[in-house]
């Protein structure tokens, strides 16, 4: 068999392999950078999920709001009691100072 007869087929095969390799390289060249970006996003998402585990849920926030409202009521009662005690103390002080004068 003569090599001259095979040369066009060998050239075509080499050209097809070269074009196929170029196309494959073109389409997979972004895969590494995409994989790196995907790994970075995965890390960020994992960090966010871990942070969210420690945060209170809707029910906990609602319970805190109710507890704060109750505490405000207790503080209002305490303020009224303190005002009454202050008035009594002032009257006693005025009485004691009036006796000395």
Image: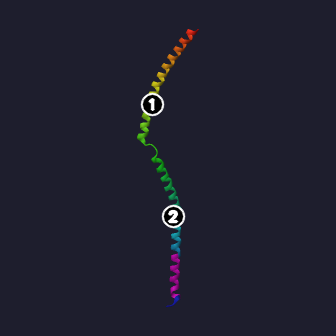
Q: Nearer the viewer, residue 29 or 81?
A: 81
The residue pinned by badge 1 equals 71
Residue 18 is labelled as none
Tag 1, which secondary structure?
A: helix
Q: Residue at x 53, y 85 (%)?
A: 7
- Residue 53 lies, with reference to residue 39, above or below; the image says above
Q: Residue at x 54, y 62 (%)?
A: 33
Q: Nearer the viewer, residue 62 or 82?
A: 82
2 or 1: mark nearer the eye: 1
* Extreme residue toward the left, this view: 59
Tag 2, which secondary structure?
A: helix
Q: Residue at x 48, y 53 (%)?
A: 46
Residue 31 is labelled as 2
Check residue 5 for magenta coloring: yes
Q: What span is in magenta?
A: 4-17
- Residue 85 lies, with reference to residue 22, above or below; the image says above
**Rendered-image quadrant of the C terminus:** top right
Q: Mark 2 or mark 1: name the one nearer the start of the chain.
A: 2
Colouring mode (rainbow / by chain / secondary structure / one colour): rainbow
Give the percent coordinates (x, y) of residue 80. Answer: 47, 22
Q: Quadrant of residue 59?
A: top left
Q: Nearer the viewer, residue 96 or 44?
A: 96
Question: Within 10 angstroms of label 1, few (less than 14), some, or many (20 or more) residues?
Answer: few
- Residue 9 lies, with reference to residue 24, above or below; the image says below
Give the percent coordinates (x, y) of residue 79. Answer: 48, 24
Check residue 57 for magenta coloring: no
Q: Residue at x 45, y 24 (%)?
A: 77
């Amino acid at each position: 068999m003569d090599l001259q007869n095979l040369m066009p087929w060998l050239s075509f095969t080499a050209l097809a392999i070269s074009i196929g390799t170029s196309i494959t390289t073109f389409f997979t060249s972004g895969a590494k950078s995409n994989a790196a970006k995907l790994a970075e996003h995965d890390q960020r998402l994992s960090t966010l999920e871990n942070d969210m585990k420690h945060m209170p849920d809707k029910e906990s926030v609602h319970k805190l709001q109710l507890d704060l409202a109750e505490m405000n009521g207790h503080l209002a009662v305490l303020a009224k009691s303190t005002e009454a005690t202050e008035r009594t103390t002032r009257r006693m002080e005025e009485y004691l100072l009036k006796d000395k004068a």
